[in-house]
Image (tube, grey):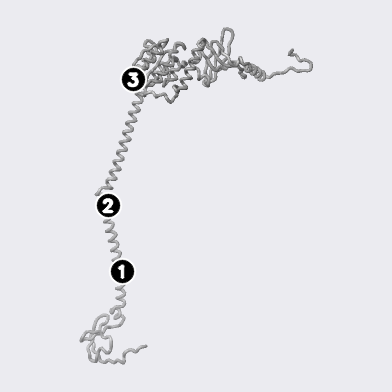
Amino acid sequence: MSYFQTFGSEPKIWSVIDLTRYVRQTLETDYRLQDLWVMGEAFNVSRPSSGHLYFTLKDAEASLRCVMWRSEVADLAALPRDGEAIEVHGRISVYEAGGQYQLYADDIRPAGIGALFEEFFRLRDRLEEEGLFDPERKRPLPAWPKRIGVVTSPTGAALRDVINVLRRRYPLVEVILAPTPVQGDEAPAGIVSALAALNTYSQPDVILVVRGGGSIEDLWAFNDEGVARAIAASEAPVVSGIGHETDVIIADYVADVRAPTPSAAAEVATPDREVLADELVETRNALERAFGDNLQELRRMHRDWMVRLRFASPRAQVANARQRVDEGSHRIEAAIRHQLALRQSAVAGLSQTLRAVGPAAVMARGYSVVTRVKDGAVVRSVGQVEPDEGINVRVSDGTFGAQVTSSDENDKPQKGD
């Protein structure tokens, strides 16, 4: 039908998003485009901080944009490199925001070695199910290794890199080389024998299994099941430093620590002597501070014990007893003085009372005391004296004699007078 308007109908006008979604749905409903392998050369490979993988797949006449999500990238044995011929599995869909169709990849393998990678994944999954990759079985590396075993080729660059790093960082360590082929059909058996020899005869603190970079075929010996089990069974912890950082092999999964390169493996396994020197200075300073703090604490404890000793010594007890005796004496003296003062006050009161009612005070008011001369008896009644009897009369200021001239009992005072 022509796109020109026909009689009685109007052409459908698509929005960009509607058309893009229609194309996407059309592609996604074609089962042949949802499960396919595409071969080409990888270009513009990038992996941003998000962890996703972006690249372009090219051949002589066309290109195809590809994206692989982070969760799928984590399962790759190795990331593709620019110019590398690869086979990519995935599904075709449309990126709506860019209006471009692209391949959403879920697996990548080098072109021509798909069978090897299938074997790699089968072995990896089987060993993972057995628990050989579990983090719980990974052993920590010794902080101060005295002897390091190295499993590698004696003529390869990896050994020179390891020796140079160890000589620079930690020259005190003893290095034991277990030579073995690291490439070819004889390499797996040689690597297994080298690990066994080191654990049996040298008993190193840590073992480095290292090899320089190469193609996936060159590194394939380290994907061998026997090598993986020998690494897992090693008595000493194993550091793998095989190939480049992007090369991930089964030996890396099994090793206690994975290093991206042989040089990095040597660095991971040893402390840096410059760092050690700094730590030694810090340790010495810490010991000096601790010694000073302990000395201060001992001095403080000494002062405390001296104070306690002074309080607990007999001299201190005697001094305290003396002070208590002095205080008791003062209290007794004060009590005696108080009682004496009270009694003196009472005596003074009685004396004043006696003076007020005593003979002297009475006589001072005009009274006198009469006594008989003959016997000194106090005359209290008229009947006690007779006429012409001598008497003595005592007044307030002295005594004088007198003679009774008469006595009349009738002069006695009568009751009621």
User: Residue 33 lies in what quarter of the image?
Assistant: top right
Please tell me how crowded label 3 is: few (under 14), some (14-19), or many (20+) other residues with Cα within 10 Å: some
- Left or right? Give the position of 289 relative to 89: left
Asked which secondary structure carries label 3, the reply is loop
- Left or right? Give the position of 362 relative to 14: left
Mark 3 vs mark 1: which is more N-terminal? 3
Q: Position of residue 275 (x, y in %)?
A: 37, 23
Placement of 55 over or under 412, stated as above or below = above
- Please state which of residues 321 and 140 is positioned toward the viewer in this rendering: 140
For the residues labelled 3 and 1, say whether their Cβ atoms are less than 8 Å apart.
no
Tag nearer the camera, 2 or 1: 2
Rendered image: mark on residue 203: 3
Q: Position of residue 232 (x, y in %)?
A: 41, 20
Q: CA distance from mark 3 to mark 2?
A: 73 Å
Specify whether residue 167 is in view: no
Please tell me how crowded label 2 is: few (under 14), some (14-19), or many (20+) other residues with Cα within 10 Å: few
Give the residue type that dot 2 points to: Asn
Please tell me how crowded label 1 is: few (under 14), some (14-19), or many (20+) other residues with Cα within 10 Å: few
Q: Which residue is mark 1?
A: 345
Placement of 339 over or under 141, stated as above or below = below
Give the residue type that dot 1 points to: Ser
- Please state which of residues 307 and 272 is positioned toward the viewer in this rendering: 272
Q: Position of residue 30 (x, y in %)?
A: 63, 16
Asked which secondary structure carries label 2, the reply is helix
Mark 3 vs mark 2: which is more N-terminal? 3
Tag nearer the camera, 3 or 2: 3
Q: Which residue is depicted at the point 29% across and 43% down?
A: 305
User: Residue 24 lies in what quarter of the image?
Assistant: top right
Q: Which residue is mark 2?
A: 320
Placement of 150 over or under 392, stated as above or below = above
Tag nearer the camera, 3 or 1: 3
